[in-house]
Amino acid sequence: MLNPDSTTHTYLGPDMGFDPSSFDALCVAEARSMIAKTPRMTAGTTKLTANEIGMRYEVEIENSLASSLAALVSDTPVAEDGDHLFSASLALQIGKLRNFVLEKTNAIVATPYQCEELQELNQSAAELVTQLNIPMPPMVNNLMGVRVKVDDFNPSGQIPQGDGLIAIHVDKPEMFVGMASMMVPGFDGLDLANQSEPVKIPAEMLHMEGLDVFALMTKNAIGAAVGEQHAKDLVKFMAAKPQDNGTFFSVSYDMAKQMEIQMAMSEKFGIDMDEDQSPANEVAEAVRESYSAMLGRSRVDMRLTGDGLVIDSIISFK
């Protein structure tokens, strides 16, 4: 793409609106140094059956950078599979991530790009250094990951509400509890550190009527069950097996239910169908019903390895 006479640029350049003719030798060299960090992406089909489609994307990353990125991933368990509405997991060591980004941005500030087209990167790096140098609260700096599992979501109430499970993985859970005790009167009375079963949080602490929340603390996480029916599942949820393959983000959701919720949210916020377009609306509604009857689940897993980034995606059909 950097060579205006190449076959690649001849075919793709005009459609992408990319003109490298203004790049001098210095700009080309700096652009190539950036490209060398992630030189290639490969994509392909991993599964193709009557009711499943699987895809994989592999982004090659320069070895030292890939290893540094992989070291940021924590052992937080991945998103659960099942018949629930939605589950997700983020497994990144926030303190290490901050230090990593600060190191890379400081390097740009120390040796800024000389190419005129890359000056915005220099400015963004300088601004980011200023922002990252602001001290982070200890409980944020110790954050290792977050997991959530939602079994139901009602968008039609005055306040949209869902029920399910959440776990916040931290390096020192007792520090997190200590901070909560200072901010929420009476929280220390729950004595989470010495409980083996979920403890119900009093309604006066939540300041939300009709909401049942149960909490549990383990050696590496603080968990909560929203909805009394899920309290019994919290212990198992908190005891999920740690992952060890570099997955830093994973998500699984019911596509048909997600579509239904989107429609309900549209109606709630007054995005009504135009009566003048009723024939088109009827067709759109028929298509939505057809999709709802056909769609199953979607799952995406992103992981970092010593070679780069791997993204696995699988879609199932009923």
Image: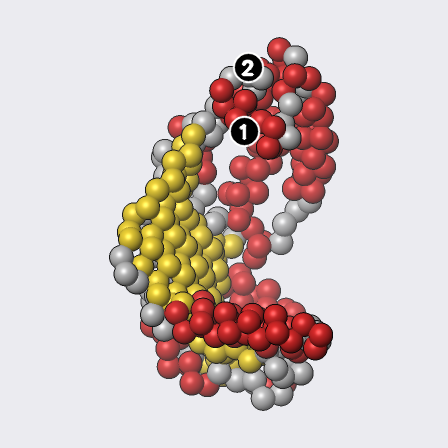
Q: Seen in the image, is 219 located left or right of residue 32?
A: left
In the picture, measured across the screen, residue 262 lies left or right of residue 40, that is: right
Say which amino acid is labelled 1: Leu
Q: Which residue is mark 2?
A: 5
Q: Secondary structure at mark 2?
A: loop
Q: Residue at 72%, 37% (x, y): give it.
A: 127
Q: Is residue 290 visible?
A: yes
Give percent across and percent down for residue 251: 43, 59
Secondary structure of the residue carrying numbered label 1: helix
* Viewer-proximal residue among 269 and 190: 269
Q: Which residue in the rendered view is the most extreme toward the top?
A: 25
* Foreground of the two, 117 or 48: 48
The residue under label 1 is 12
Horizontal and vertical percent position of residue 231: 42, 81
How far apart in space, not on screen, are marks 1 and 2 (Cα)?
12 Å
* Sequence order check, earlier mark of 1 and 2: 2
